[in-house]
Amino acid sequence: MTHCQHAGRRSRLGWAFYDWANSTFATTVVAGFFPVFFKTFWSSGNSAQMSTLQLGLGSALASLIVLFAAPLGGAVADRGHRKKAGLALATGIAIAATAGLFFVGQGQWLGAMTLFVIASIGFFMAMVFYDSLLVEVAAPRDYDRTSALGYGLGYLGGGLLLAINVWMTLYPHLFGLPDRAAAVRWSFLSVAVWWAVFSLPLFAFTHEPPARDAPGAREALRDGLRDLAVTARQILGQRDVWMFLLAYWLYIDGVHTIIRMAVDFGLSLGFGQESLIVALLLVQFIGFPAAVAFGWLASFWDTRKAIYLGLSVYVGITAWGYFLTAVWQFYFMAAAIGLVQGGVQSLSRSYFARLIPDGKAGEYFGVYNMMGKFAAVLGPVLVGVTAAATGSARLSIVSIVILFIAGGGLLTRVGGQESGDTA
């Protein structure tokens, strides 16, 4: 093994470990504890309707800011070769805000929501810089496996800390904590510490090529704004790029809708909260080896066909949801989702990386992540309208099939480079 090969592998592993670090925010904070703890602790003096409104407005505000900031942040990073610097800044802000949740007292809903919005913006902006670094740490032939390794480690790390945090909340006295509320607050702090510690391998081992005559911050911002306008015109002129982004928006909307609506669907069928936690952990731990396996499958087979495989499984899972009657079937559905969720996400990232012109990774991944923020818009509307029109939670979940079929159909019209290409 040459030094170059060793450095390359170490750089890729350091990059992938960032997924292990930051996925704990998505699992413990976003999906696990924040929504429930906000309603029962921080917004305890308000009605259920008011706390729901506060949650919705806060999430919408974070998404709206990222929607406009992501492409610009990517353009600035490209212009000044500052992807790692941007990642460090966004990560630091997100970690500080997440840690701050530990100190927010009961009834202080505005402080909690403010910190959550800041942490969410930092999290999603960091993903723009992180995703764009993929083209710096791996050759095109290694995109699939490297991207899949990141997602796989993310599922494992996020699931591991979530399991520990759930254990803490179920048995707080084992950890020397007085009650569940204290356990949840310590869980938020544990996410911040975990995120900070396991981000270090990326900053230590992942190298971004230095720029010659890199502009100052103000000049980079001005040039980034100009480049962003040029990029928008370029994307509209590149059929494969905008066609992929449209396909991705549709099918990833289906993926995100299932992630967000699965708990509500389980509750509507009468399953208990413990069962839903078990299902969430199943997705996380099965997602680790499955995402890595999808990366290897794509490298030996074909990236786009591997995405089709994942979408086909999603169609089958979603249709089968109509017939669910028992908890064990819900667990089976969660396990099947775990098999393909990380694969579809990771291979979409690596496939898009092959469509990006040289030197444009930050800008293009800014747009890519912007499309991701647009996701989970059509799906919830489909689910809600179908539920209201039919009165059936089962039919409402089946409606998501439309998004997978439409997205997969558009993906067939994308040309681009396949997984075996090296340039």
Image (cartoon, rainbow, N blue to C red):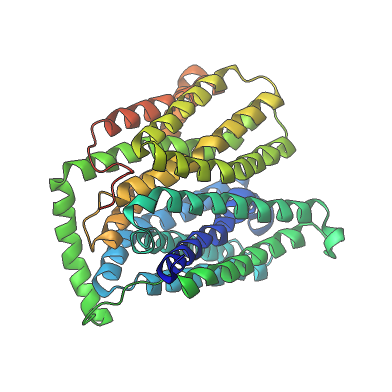
Tell me if 358 is positioned left or right of 126 in this view: left
Image quadrant in which you'd find residue 107: bottom right
Q: Is residue 376 visible?
A: no
Name the residue at 66% across, 71% down.
103
Q: Is residue 96 above or below residue 31?
A: below
The spot of residue 352 in percent (x, y) is 31, 48
The spot of residue 41 in percent (x, y) is 69, 56
Name the residue at 54% across, 72% down.
200
Tell me if 194 is positioned left or right of 380 in this view: right
The spot of residue 299 in percent (x, y) is 40, 43
Q: Is residue 371 above or below residue 112?
A: above
Q: Is residue 258 above or below residue 126?
A: above
Name the residue at 23% across, 75% down.
220
Q: Residue furthest front?
A: 1
Tell me if 289 is positioned left or right of 106 in this view: left
Q: Nearer the viewer, residue 141 or 306?
A: 141
Image quadrant in which you'd find residue 229: bottom left
Q: Nearer the viewer, residue 177 or 35?
A: 177
The spot of residue 413 in percent (x, y) is 23, 32
Q: Nearer the viewer, residue 395 or 298?
A: 298
Image quadrant in which you'd find residue 133: bottom left
Name the residue at 54% across, 49% down.
152
Q: Is residue 3 visible?
A: yes
How many marks the image carries: the answer is 0
